[in-house]
Image (spheres, coloured by chain):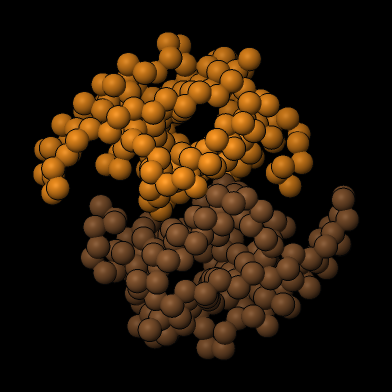
Chain colours: A brown, B orange
Amino acid sequence: MIHLTVITVGNLKESYWRDAVAEYEKRLGAYCKPSIIQLKEGSLSENPSEGEIRACLDEEGKRILDAIPPRAYRIALCVEGKQFSSEGLAKKLDSILSENGSICLIIGSSHGISQKVKDLCQLRLSVSELTFPHQMMRVLLLEVLYRSFSILHGSKYHK
Amino acid sequence: MIHLTVITVGNLKESYWRDAVAEYEKRLGAYCKPSIIQLKEGSLSENPSEGEIRACLDEEGKRILDAIPPRAYRIALCVEGKQFSSEGLAKKLDSILSENGSICLIIGSSHGISQKVKDLCQLRLSVSELTFPHQMMRVLLLEVLYRSFSILHGSKYHK
């Protein structure tokens, strides 16, 4: 069974995001063993300086690295990462899964992901040039993964 | 007051999408007069041929064209359209709004948008190279528009 871990930072405040995440988690269960790890967001002042933000990201980054399952293939979600078509991503996922039984995807906090975490990831994945709230990104990513698995299994979900 | 029309095809089946759309509609109300037009999805057989799909898109397309407010600046959402960064899209929106008081964005059905509708739009906008369900795209687009307005108004929503 494929182990799929999604590491996130911060709570889902809106109930509609929580409901959507629960639904996609359930659907993904048909294809893999999904697990969502939710870390606490670092605290920042009202108007944080660049330095404060960097220190916060570094601290969050340490906890992210601790949470990555050993031997998992590591993917960081970042706006500057590589974009794929749905078919292209399914193919990439297939090739990753041929050599790895465990995949870990990382979504940062509202300020992003530390450079150290990005450097330790084997792939930087971008969903869009646009910025989305990290809460919404959790739903987006689960949909993207569900669609990838559906394509690989020849389901009718992706027409 | 800016008139913002979003034309969509098909119902939102999941309550979490409906709740998210309602929330973003409310938030957008601070910046414009949003209105979502939901057209009925054309009916197709279980395994439709290319021809059937084209005929269905053409028929949906006619109803979409009828629903576009006169003199609105027309934007079609398509995977092959132009992508923007959040700041870039806000700038584009600003330039559109300097000459138009009404904008109409069109999200197709699960099979897309007819060529005729695409041809009649002044801009084809892409959110991602990835395909998303058209229900989810409605939420995505509203978030994208809300972020654009927030940037133009200098709010802290987009950091």
Q: Who is closer to the viewer here, B9 or A68? A: B9
Q: Residue furthest top?
A: B70
Residue A7 spot, x, y in % from top left: 60, 71
Asked which quadrant contains residue B116, the reply is top left
Assign the N terminus of chain B to one quadrant of the image. top right
Q: From what the image shows, is residue A107 above or below residue B105?
A: below
- For residue B30, which quarter of the picture? top right
Q: Where is residue A64 drawn, in percent x and y?
A: 67, 75
Which residue does the image show at 39% across and 64% down from the upper left?
A: A27
Q: Is residue B100 visible?
A: yes
Q: Provide residue A105's location: percent of width, then percent of height.
A: 54, 71
Q: Is residue B95 left or right of residue B18?
A: right
Q: Is residue B99 or residue A132 the one in the foreground? A: A132
Q: Is residue A70 left or right of residue B8?
A: right
Q: Residue at x 84, y 59 (%)?
A: A44
B112 up-or-down from A41: above or below: above
* Image coords of residue B126 (percent x, y): 44, 41
Drawn side of residue A141 relative to residue A56, left or right: left
The extreme bottom residue here reads: A70
Q: Residue at x 66, y 53 (%)?
A: A13
Evaluate whether residue A145 shows in this view: no
Please give the name of the residue rendered at 67% of the width and 65% of the height, measured from the top-left corner.
A9
Vertical placement of residue A15 versus B43, above or below:
below
Total numbered labels: 0
